[in-house]
Amino acid sequence: MGTALVYDEEMTKYKLLWVDPACKIEVPERLTASYEALVRSGLSGRCVSVPARQASDAEILLVHSEEYLEAVKKTPYMTLEDLKEFTLQYGDVYFHPNIYHCAKLAAGSVLQLVDSIMTGKVRNGIALVRPPGHHSMRGAANGFCVFNNVAIAARYAKQKYGVKRVLIVDWDIHHGQGVQYCFEDDPSVLYFSWHRYEHQKFWPHLRESDYDSVGKGSGAGFNINVPWNKVGMENSDYLSVFCHVLLPAAYEFCPDLVLVCAGFDSAIGDPEGEMCATPDIFAHLTHLLMNLAGGKLCAALEGGYNLTSLAQSVCQTVQTLLGDPLPRLANLRSPCISALESLQCARSAHRQYWSFLKHAANPPLPEISTKPIKLAKEEEEPAETAEEESSGEAKVWPEPPQRSCPPVCSASVLPDDVAGADGLKRLSTSGALQPRLVNKLKNHFTKAADDGDAVATISRLHTLMEKMLTNEIGNGLALVPDVAAATMCFAQDLASDLVDRVLVVCVGNATGLNYVTTDGRALVVHISGEDGEERKSKYYIPVRLKQGCGDTSGFLQAVLGLLLPLGYEYDPGLVLLGRMPESGVGDGMWQQLIGLLRGFAKGHTLVLMQANEEACMGPTASALLGHPAAPLQELGAPFPQDGDALERLRERLQADWKMLQTTGRMDC
Ligand SMILES: COCC(O)(O)CCCCCNCCCN
Ligand SMILES: [Zn+2]
């Protein structure tokens, strides 16, 4: 199934008609720059084009009051003076004779996306719209927004398709207070937002944008705010919040539909956000949400004011929605102290609501100043004057890397003709394997050197690896006689010669996974039901689940809170995933694991399974081909001892692995 793209140039036909420094950044070119970049890159041609439509009154009234709608209906007939007058009653927004028409198209465009996704016409999609929506409230326009496009879409999906739970992820750099107000007492809508806050000194200066606004009444726990109290946040800060706050809650919430308030003012170069995350981060943020709700993801453009980073970020998002391999995120740094404090505050505020947080460390939180902040006049964001704009040093960042389309056969079990007793010899004569490697392999398999099978297996694996590294295939699946041996041999003898770093993930009980490197050429993470060999090196991490890998909630917590952050920090060139016999891991969890691991190494994942596990071939190949993983059933809380052990393990490991940190020094 494909990716829908909704765009209508009619939504470019309104603009600011008077002088207002606060609104001048919201220009029609935001839409044309985004759309033209999709056309230029060939991405729009790969999408299913879905027409925009006007939202009806009834649809707008799902969120807004009649009084407000009636008022906005009058704006097309207003004089310029009346429009200015009308605008004054709201904050940081402007009206135009055509904005009501465009606001109905913006809201209707997102509803068209919801229809296309819920009727199975497409898997996911994005609507390039303006005016944006997440600040507008029941009875008021605000922050360039007239109707709350995403809030209307959430209510519409529930009403028309009986959707039970909607996750709204708001990665725009401003707090979508309009969305928060709309759903704060509604447990069927989980709203997550990060936003520039600077201890309430940043617009819209709301006390309720802080992390302690967790929702009200039966909605308590279903509103997650992560305030950024400093600018300059980077990729690692964003990924940490996804791994340690959003994703565990999102999986526990188990949504039927994911809506994204896709604002790209959180990218580097944006004058509003002043953050430093690069456009390719949106490839990963999108990817990390794509295995929820069976892949039903609907993104709506919100903010984004640097036309270069906006266009690049939109392309990164769409390319991921289309299923293309992700770019590697080079040299992630450790999250900054301020980000860690925000992360910890959000986790502590939600500890009582989410089982994944039940065992989280609970250090004292900083006193939240309840006194209203006094914005000294000069502290108000100064309206940039022309020369200041030019003097502000322009941010530069590298163009996101090309992301080649996945090769057609992205999962393959090599035909037997590659195997064969002389497989290895042929490889060595073909120069594919350096002679010394051949000896190493032979030595390694001396016990079975005469056993053609083992040698054949190794030559098969090597061919798969070769094809992966030449991008002839995206990923691979190999059935082998002895998974543990093959995994170790592959990691030790094959991969380490052909790729800098290989992430080895072993699932299920096994002995012999004793390959430990001290040089970091391989990172082995072994999730099983028994005690692994105790940790000898930073690069061998046994994760023990007392109830074994069949305990999906424990397994998932290990994947989201440990494996993902480790993988991002390690940044492997290849992922090797070994499924040990009788691992007990459920198909759904197995597919989620493969889906998430595809985000590393440009999707180069080699799965090794026991030859007799044909039953698992289908689900594995489906996940390798990028089909969305089956949604996990309602997750119970992880077993207490597992939850506790995982938290203790994470705390122990964070000295070596910065992406595992979740607490900053609370020297507030
Ligand atoms: C959904 O709208 C997208 C958005 O969140 O980017 C809107 C931001 C409004 C930013 C308003 N700045 C006011 C400065 C006051 N001195
Ligand atoms: Zn914004």
Image: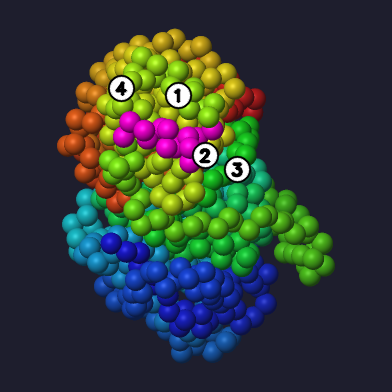
- Residue under label 3: 330
- Residue 451: mark: 4
Q: Are marks 2 and 4 in contact (CB under 8 Å)?
A: no
User: Is residue 457 shown above or below 176?
Assistant: above
- Residue 323: mark: none
Q: Nearer the viewer, residue 632 or 584?
A: 584
How far apart are the alpha carbons under marks 3 and 2? 31 Å
Q: Are marks 1 and 2 in contact (CB under 8 Å)?
A: no
Q: Amino acid at mark 2?
A: Gly
Q: Are marks 1 and 4 in contact (CB under 8 Å)?
A: no
Q: Residues within 10 Å of mark 3 (few under 14, many from 20)?
A: few
Magenta residue span: 420-434
How far apart are the alpha carbons under marks 1 and 4? 13 Å
The percent position of residue 574, horizontal first and vertical second, equals 47, 38
The percent position of residue 541, horizontal first and vertical second, equals 45, 20
Q: Amino acid at mark 3?
A: Ala
The percent position of residue 172, horizontal first and vertical second, equals 51, 55
Viewer can see residue 660: no
- Residue 74 within the magenta-colored segment of the rendering: no
- Residue under label 2: 431
Q: Nearer the viewer, residue 663 or 482?
A: 482
**Number of the front mark, 1 or 2:** 2
Q: Amino acid at mark 4?
A: Asp
